[in-house]
Amino acid sequence: MKSNIPWLIAAVTGCTMIVAWFVPVAKDWRDEAGTWYEILAAIAFVLGGANLFTQHLQKISARRAGWGYSAVTLVAFVGTLVVGLLKVGVIPDDPNYPWSGYHQEEGSALWWLFYYVYNPLTAAMFALLAFYVASAAFRAFRVKNAEATLLLSTAFIVLLGRTYAGAWLTSPVPDEYSALTFPGLTAIILGVFNTAGQRAIMIGIALGVAATSLKVLLGVDRSYLGSD
């Protein structure tokens, strides 16, 4: 019974979403289904935040390895939550309603945290990732066989096609043969071969999602309930 009731809830909700989005007659259900999704998402955010707070607090109290990072995480989490909920620095739209302002208004504390703390940290993280990507590309592009040679050649063409050097090197090519320039070859590779590969991958993912969803709706897969 403990596993049947959650499964029935998941099955009914999943079938309702399927009917709402794939049956034209039930198109009015879409707004209702969207409301359900927003309510569930809000509950999930609250549960996720409570779980994050509890896990890191336990790590700090037990002085486990890396507890300093947990302290920084909690300070950032609580600080952002407080200034966002209290709308610190937000000018009210209506003087009679002090909470009427937009929480991300320019100049507010949350806006300042986003633009002057979060954005620089994100840029720094991706700047560091660039070196790891370059290192991985150097190892992957070593010419060991025909596949590696093709990969290296394609990457070289796309790299030149996205830079000024590639356009300058092929600038003498007449306009009627623009497809043979580095920018033209790059457009062909990204627009034809890359798009075809991406669509094939997306079709495979869609089939996998459909198969997994059917297993969940039929009760074949109940791993999300913590049972075998």
Image (spheres, rainbow, N blue to C red):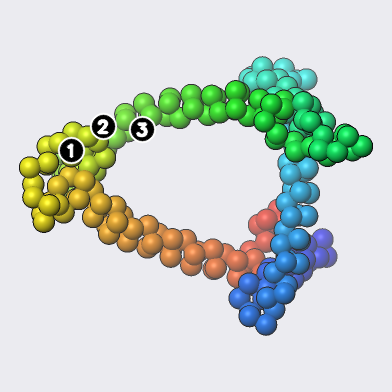
* 10 Å crowding of disc 1: few (<14), some (14-19), many (20+): some
Q: Which mark is residue 133?
A: 3
User: Which element carries disc 1, helix, strand or loop?
Assistant: helix
Q: Nearer the viewer, residue 135 or 188?
A: 188
Q: Which residue is mark 1?
A: 166
Classify 65 as above or below 106: above
Q: Secondary structure at mark 2?
A: helix
Q: Position of residue 27 (x, y in %)?
A: 68, 75
Name the residue located 67 percent from the left edge and 82 percent from the top edge. Answer: 25
The C terminus sits in image quarter: bottom right
Q: Residue at x 73, y 41 (%)?
A: 48
- Mark 3 or mark 2, which is nearer the start of the sequence? 3
Q: CA distance from mark 1 to mark 2?
A: 20 Å
Q: Which mark is residue 8?
A: none
> Which of pointers 3 and 1 indicates the residue nearer the eye?
1
Q: Total label count?
A: 3
Query: Type of residue at label 3?
Result: Val
Measured along the vertical axis of the image, is residue 191 above or below residue 219?
A: above
Q: Amino acid at mark 2?
A: Phe
Distance CA(mark 2)–CA(mark 3) = 9 Å
Which residue is the site of mark 2? 138
For residue 143, which quarter of the picture? top left
Circle 2 Cα neighbour tier, 10 Å, few/some/many (<14 / 14–19 / ≥20): few
